Image (cartoon, rainbow, N blue to C red):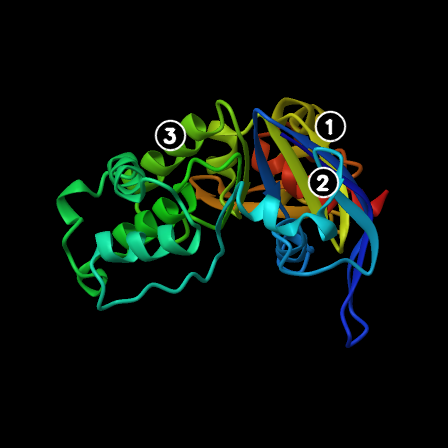
Amino acid sequence: MEITIDHLNMTYPNGKQALRDISLQLASPNLIGLLGPNGAGKSTLMKLLVAGLMPTEGEIRVDGAPLRRHEKELKNRLGYLPQSFGLYDELTVWQFLDYMAALKNIPDAKRAIDQVIEAVNLSEKRKARIRTLSGGQRQRVGVAQALLGDPQFLIFDEPTVGLDPEERIHFRNLFSRAAQDKIVVLSTHIIEDVQSVCNRLIVMDRGRVRFDGTPAALIQRAEGHVGVFEQAEAASTEGLHITSRVNTARGIRCRAVAALLPAFVQPVEPTLEDAYLYCIAGEEAQ
């Protein structure tokens, strides 16, 4: 499967421009991390990809065919978990998934439901009413409905927010397995999630793509722009984007990113989180 995003612009009726000249190529197999601060345009882009909105300018093509004329075909190949996904609390897990399978016109629904319930490790809860489930279990139901019908294109919006580490590891492994023959887009603020499983990162800010490449390439881009210093020794922190402050025996040790590190800052190897913050904040100073 191949999705082409060609010079996409999106302006809402109130005049807010959410996307500015976005061009991307998405092809399977791929596990793509979509990163960016609130208001970066990530949610708008995902709504356009699932045909929930139509762009102001530009075009999205699926295997060469314009999305606006083949919306139904895309939705038959799509699994989507939005950040706010409503569940019917009085239904059991099985009943809810059966309802979603009917909406998706999935043949052999019983077999498909059994497969996704096992995939998300909810076999023991298949007959439980959704209102009795924990937050992590409810998220698993949301992921399960996205996986119904073995779609070729999967989008997950903040799927691990509020989950404990064990639940997050389970989800990351699930996404990784799903991406072996599919396009999977994972939108999240949790850097650890994308670092663990994504082979490609797209960083957005203010409606534009600021970076598109591998995690290693993003880290390399931040080399020489990340450092540490003792707060008491700092002549001035102007131009520094401080990412952490740690109390030590010598005082407060700070970590920062900057377009140009002052002499009192000792350069260190950047992490992926450092690199992301430099991409969003540090490069603006250049």
Provide the secondary structure element on which disc 2 rests: helix
At 35% across and 45% down in the image, what residue appears? Answer: 144
Say which quarter of the image contains residue 283: top right
Q: Which mark is residue 173?
A: 3
Query: Disc 1 or disc 3, which is closer to the eye?
Result: 3
Q: Please give left or right for residue 175 compared with residue 90 in the image.
A: right
Q: Position of residue 157 (x, y in %)?
A: 51, 50
Q: Please give left or right for residue 209 compared with residue 82 in the image.
A: right
In the rendered image, which residue does mark 2 sit on? 279
- Circle 1 packing at 10 Å, graded few (<14), some (14-19), many (20+), is some
At 42% across and 46% down in the image, what residue appears? Answer: 146
Q: Is residue 10 above or below residue 115?
A: below
At label 2, the amino acid type is: Cys
Chain-order first, disc 2 or disc 3: 3
Between marks 1 and 2, how big is the CA–CA gap? 8 Å
Quadrant in which the C terminus appears? top right
Provide the secondary structure element on which disc 1 rests: helix
At 68% across and 47% down in the image, what residue appears? Answer: 70
Q: Are marks 1 and 2 in contact (CB under 8 Å)?
A: yes
Q: Which mark is residue 198?
A: none
In the rendered image, which residue does mark 1 sit on? 221
Chain-order first, disc 1 or disc 3: 3
